[in-house]
Each structure stands twice: as structure tokens, then as C-alpha cells.
Image (spheres, grey):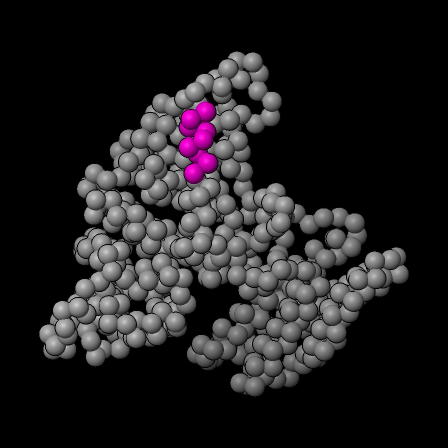
Amino acid sequence: MLRTVNAQPTLWESLLPEMCLGLPAELEAVDRLLDDQAFFAPYRKHFHPLFGRPSVPIETYLRLMFLKFRYRLGFEPLCREVADSISWQRFCRIPLGVAPPHPTTLMKITTRCGTQAITELNDALLAKALEAKVLKTNKVRADSTVVEANVAYPSDSGLLAKGVVKMTKLARTLHEIGFARRTKMGDRTRGVLSRARSINANLNRRNDDGLAIVRRINSELVAIARRVATDADALVKNATRKLRGTTSGRARRLTDELEKTAELTRRVAAQTAERMAGGMPAGSTRIVSLHDPDARAIRKGRLGKPVKFGYKAQLVDNSDGVIVDHNVEMGNPADAPMLEPAISRIKARTGRAPRAVTADRGYGEAGIEQSLRTLGVRYVVLPTKGKPNAARRAVEKRCAFQKMVRWRTGCEGRISCAKRDFGLARTRLDGIEGARTWCGHGVFAHNLVKISGLLSQ
């Protein structure tokens, strides 16, 4: 059952001294901005209006999530800090003497409502800014970045070892709760872990003998992983047969997880075998994590960190620093095709296309410039890829063109701010939907600060 607002203040509020009743300027401005019924609408479809357990009040949930992303806190530290601060309790509309929501409750609401709710929430915030006439879209700039997944630096041998260990643990748990006990699965945990550790030791030798040993160990890991995956398939088949006559949710979840892990481990074994044969697995399909199979290796050309593992995001902001559009994609798609849909979404939200659009050289394609002009963009400032001809050089040397190109570089700072201050550097939710949900909350918190500041002015 959905609750939108919290209970009435308790008697303790009337006993507080006046100095304890105020809020910091930023929180006070954000509190006024969030005090609107329009921000409750995206969550109504996810809860029954009459039946069920009462939810956390949505006004409290939104304020807690703002504090989480604004100050980059985990769910557990967030609840501890709110319980320890009178001003944060008053900001979150939690009556004094009432405990804040449990961290797992916030996690469940975040994953349950997912991408759809946070997308509608960002649209509602931009619509409110547009209604107050503080949202400028006369000129916008776009740039892409990588939102890293919550994974360690992957290696094929490490992934194979982790897959075997995980399948062994899941099989043992299924046996303990009474499923597929006759289907045996050998414990090869110590063997794969010792082989994975020995690879690093032999790579340090940097000679032909060391490389030959590494290839042999990788071949052994591939063979072991495939055998364990085959045993896991048999165990899943027998456990599924018994699940037909039971309602054990835990056993069903374990069986599904074992089946998924076996498939992912088999894919890692295939890409390892392909690499050992002299090939290179395609980056668009290469598995870099077992718990986040949607993450991909993305090369951005940085000197210190040339390859990152996660998702590609595009941010479009205006002259006031408000992020007017964002999207998160799996893999490493080209920059240029993402620009036209972003401008189309901005036009749909505001009713008119931006007057000027600029981006870096990665967007500089003739077809993109023509499609933006079709949408109604008057000035398209996109440096051309490759070597421009004489006519194009004359265009790019104009003062107005150079001025817009210099203004575009501010988007790099906007991305840095969003990563550093609002959690977009690394997503803590797995999968492409989790990454979109996480980034949506970060963008929402960022825009709350920017738009509330504009309204205060």
C-alpha cells in the first residue's frame, strides 16, 4: 500500500529550541522543490492504493535517496547518519522519536520501481523547472563517458575459477536443503584456485617457458570449468524435476542461479579457448563479470586507464549546468548515433528544439548534422572527423564556431562533477537496468541542486 506523506510531527518538535529547527541552505531549497505531489506519481503504479503492507512514505524515500547520492553514502551509513542528525530527520520528514526506514527497505523500493520510475521522476523535475521558466535549452552540449560496473579487474582465468567456486557452493547448498542429492558434483575449488594463483607467478617470468606453462594452466582451467558446468546442468535438470511438486522459493532461486552461472562459465571458457587459439573475443559479447554479465570492456583512449569495464553514458547539459538528457547503453556504441535521439527527447520535453547543439569530434558526421537540422536545430557545431576540406576549414575557423567549441569543453567538467559528487563514477547496481536506475538517481540529485539554486535566485 502506497504512502506518500509521513505522519504528523510529534510533540518533540515543539520542544526543540529555535536553532534546531533550521536546515542548511541547500537542503532547505531542495526541500521546497521536492514538496510537490507531482513527484509521487511515478511510484503509484508500483504499489496498490489500498491493500498490502504500508510502504515508506515517498516523500521520505525521495529525500533519503537525495542524501545518499549527494553525499555518496551507502544504504546502511545513510540510515545511521539520518538517525543521528536532527536536521536530516527533519529534512526527510521523519518525526522525532521514529526510527528511519531499514536499509533493505530502501534497496527493495529502488530495485522494484527500477528504471521506469526514475525516468518519470527526472521528467517531472525538468517539467517543473520548465514551468518555473528556469530551464534554458537555447544551447546544449553533449559528451559521453563510462560508468564503471562494480567489478574487479577481470581475467579469464580468474573468471573461470570464480565460476567453478560459485557453482560448487550453489550445488552444495541445494544438496543441503534436499534437492538432487543423488547427483554428485566433485569439489574442484582448491584445484582451480591454485591454478589461477600460479598463472600470475609464471607470467612474472616473462620467457617462453613461463608462457607455455600459462597456456597449459589455462587449458586445464577451461577443461575443468566445462566439466563442472556439465555436472551443474545435470544437477539443475534433476532439481527442476523435484521443484514441480514444491513451492520452495529458495530452491528455485538457487536452481536458476546455478543454471545462469553454468551458462556464463561456459561462455568464459569459450572466449578463453578462442584467445588461446590466437583469436580475440569480440568486445561486444565478452563476459567480464559473473554477477554483472551486462558489463563490457570499453576503450576510451585514456593513458592511465585505457580500458574500463562497465557501461557507456551520454550526458547533455545546458548553460546553467542542468542535465537536460542522459542515457546509459550497454557496450561501446558510437557517439554520433546517440545525439539525435537525445535532441528528440529534449524537443519532446520542452516543445522546441535547442537553438544550438555542440559536441566533440566523435559526433562529427555529416548525416548527424543534417538530421539535427531536420529536427529544428539552427546551429550545429560539430568538428569534422578526419581532415576537413577547405570549405569546412573556413566554417570551423569562424569566431562563433570556435566560441561554441570552447564552451563545449565545460561538459567535461560537468561529467567530472556528476562522477565525483553524485555517484556516477561507479554503479552499485548490477545489470544494464541497474546501471540506468543508479545513474538516473544520480542525475536527479544533481538536477535538484542545480534547479533549486536557480529557483532560489
Camera-side residue of 408 and 55: 408
Above or below, 210 against 79 in this view is above
| Count of numbered badges drawn on the protein | 0
Q: Kindly tell me whether residue 311 is visible in this rendering.
A: yes
Where does the image place residue 87, in percent across and percent down from the top left? 24, 68
Q: Is residue 137 magenta?
A: no
Looking at the image, residue 303 sits to the left or right of residue 427; the answer is right
- Image quarter (top left, top right, bottom left or bottom right) of the N terminus: bottom left
Quadrant of the rendered structure where residue 398 is? top left
Magenta: main secondary structure: helix
Span highlighted in magenta in the image: 402-410
Q: Which residue is drawn at 69% across and 60% down?
A: 156
Camera-side residue of 57 and 93: 93
Looking at the image, residue 60 sits to the left or right of residue 79; the answer is left
Where does the image place residue 308, in percent across and percent down from the top left? 58, 52
Q: Does the magenta stretch include residue 409?
A: yes
Quadrant of the rendered structure where residue 169 is? bottom right
Residue closest to the far right: 209
Looking at the image, residue 382 sits to the left or right of residue 87; the answer is right
Looking at the image, residue 194 sits to the left or right of residue 247; the answer is right
Q: Residue at x 45, y 24 (%)?
A: 402
Camera-side residue of 152 and 454: 454
Q: Residue at x 12, y 77 (%)?
A: 15
Q: Which residue is drawn at 64% across and 76% down?
A: 168
